Image: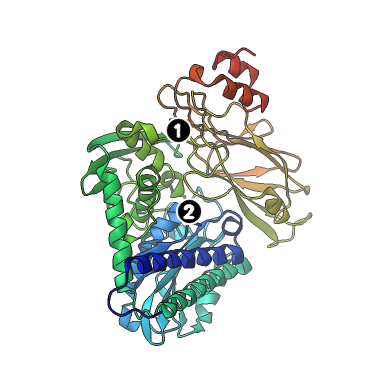
Amino acid sequence: MTFHGKIGLIDRQIMWNRLLAVVEEQAQVLQRTAFSTIVRESGDLAAGVFDAQGRMLAQAVTGTPGHINSMALAVGHVIAHHPLHTMKPGDVFIHNDPWMGTGHTNDISVTTPCFAGDRLIGFAACNSHVLDIGGMADWTSSTDVFMEGLYLPIVRLVREGVVDETLMAVIRANTRQPVETIGDVYSLLNCNEIACRRLREMMEEFSLTELDELAEHIIETSRQGVLKKIAALPKGTWRSEIALDGMDEPIVLKAALTIADDGIHVDYSGSAPMTKRNFNVPFCYTLAYTSYALGVAVIKDIPNNAGSLAPRTAFAPEGSILNALKPAAVISRAQMGLMLPDLIFGCLRQAIPDRIPAEGAGVLWNINARGPRTSPPVFGDEFRVGVVTTGGMGALPFRDGLSATGFPSGVRGGSVEIFESMSTVTVWRKEYRQDSGGPGQHRGGLGQIIEIENGIPETFIFGNNLERLRFPPRGAAGGHDGALGSVRAATRDLTVKQLHDIAPGERLVLQSPGGGGMGDPRERDRAAVRRDLENELISAQAARDIYGYEP
């Protein structure tokens, strides 16, 4: 099939769909070859294809908003540091600069220029989370970014097909998990190579020599599609705020959301200033979750690319917690960033209440543990593993919230069997947490109860870096709040964000938060209450006292 002159509309759509297939294969290759459990089991990654100008054309559905939407900026940063005329076939660039489209140092970004012969046709880019990049073992204790592990600027990892073994040696020497971390780097390289190969095949099949015309179609069609959806919304400005646990004192985030004819803008002025703790958020990550929240509430079915992202804008004052400046500590930026959708939904609920959920658990409840592999311990031989666990999503105006889900992060809950196989820890219990979903006409999603213990007579270390321990997910329209989270070991309260020693024979019990409810609980469908009671999602007391249900 050969094209002469302009490409027809149907052909453009076919090519666009092919690009979406390319990036999904790219993401699947990354996930299946990754060493990091949070990538392999939970999909904490992003993958995309960009044109020769660095504009994102297609992005994989597999992945997380924090990775996906911040990665959209990464290729532009690479081009700014390494101009196009300096790039050669076989070059690959790597970095983990939090302010250049990763968010924190544990996210590594790889960008591969795609060539057809000697002609640059586009880029493949990806990023994923590695479990250890050096730095402090306690994720709650860093006070600047230089304490948070190896900091890679945007540099060539591969030059004309030859891997820079010196740089690889530097990466290997700066991680407690050299095999896993280097394996993750190769998984990033490999998935981009696949994406470039598939891009070339697509272009050869359709006899394309460049992507310019297709890129303009994708970007402008998407931009216009988003503007059409925005045109149907009420215009105005709405405000909301949310209080988060923080560490030394609560952190308040504020937003003013404006819907106008040319887009939706979110202004975070008035939010807390940067903190000496590591909850600070680079602006790329703030923009990522702002775009995501607007996407799920308003944009929905239009694919992510440079065009569909353009009408979604944000501002946060430099030096605020949502626009932290280097060298701020940012390793735990997700603690704030994942709460932005609930903050934005607080604005949108005033404008379009028929489609916006109540607040949910928000931040993931990750089990991060490390300890000796043997008893007695052998120095240097320890496990370090993380598994994603989740809480409840807020109820929507038309249905219950999802239970034990990663919303709004997009990651899947990790397998406890994998967690056990990579550590000495035994998971004794993992079940829905009864009565944790906020009561309402539509009930909030349930959190979980997870109980773990070391399988050998040695102490293991649990890092508590969790949210929603002081401020519960709020219900809406008369719905009740979801349950607060809690962390305990035997009779000890482990609420404080820090590393905690879990002694041999002592069991750690995590109870993740439930989502807020929507509407008056006494208006809940009686059959739904009976079903919740039969499935032990609510107690008999809650059914009677809150829902007014008598069997």
> Is residue 242 among what the camera can see?
yes
Badge 1 local density, few (<14 within 10 Å), some, or many (20+)? many
Q: Residue 273, percent across and down?
A: 32, 44
Q: Residue at x 41, y 83 (%)?
A: 116
User: Which residue has dot 1 on it?
Assistant: 396
Q: Residue at x 43, y 57 (%)?
A: 68
Q: Residue at x 36, y 84 (%)?
A: 119
Say whether residue 394 is left or right of residue 12.
Answer: right
Say whether residue 258 is left or right of residue 336.
Answer: left
Q: Quadrant of residue 365?
A: top right
For the residue marked with disc 1, what is the amino acid? Leu
User: Which residue has dot 2 on it?
Assistant: 64
Would you place residue 260 above or below residue 189 in this image?
Answer: above
Badge 2 local density, few (<14 within 10 Å), some, or many (20+)? many
Q: Residue 450, percent across and down?
A: 66, 39
Mark 1 or 2 closer to N-term? Answer: 2
Would you place residue 270 above or below residue 221 in this image?
Answer: above
For the residue marked with disc 2, what is the amino acid? Thr
Would you place residue 494 above or below residue 183 in this image?
Answer: above
Q: Residue 142, percent across and down?
A: 47, 52
Disc assigned to residue 375? none
Q: Nearer the viewer, residue 121 or 182?
A: 121
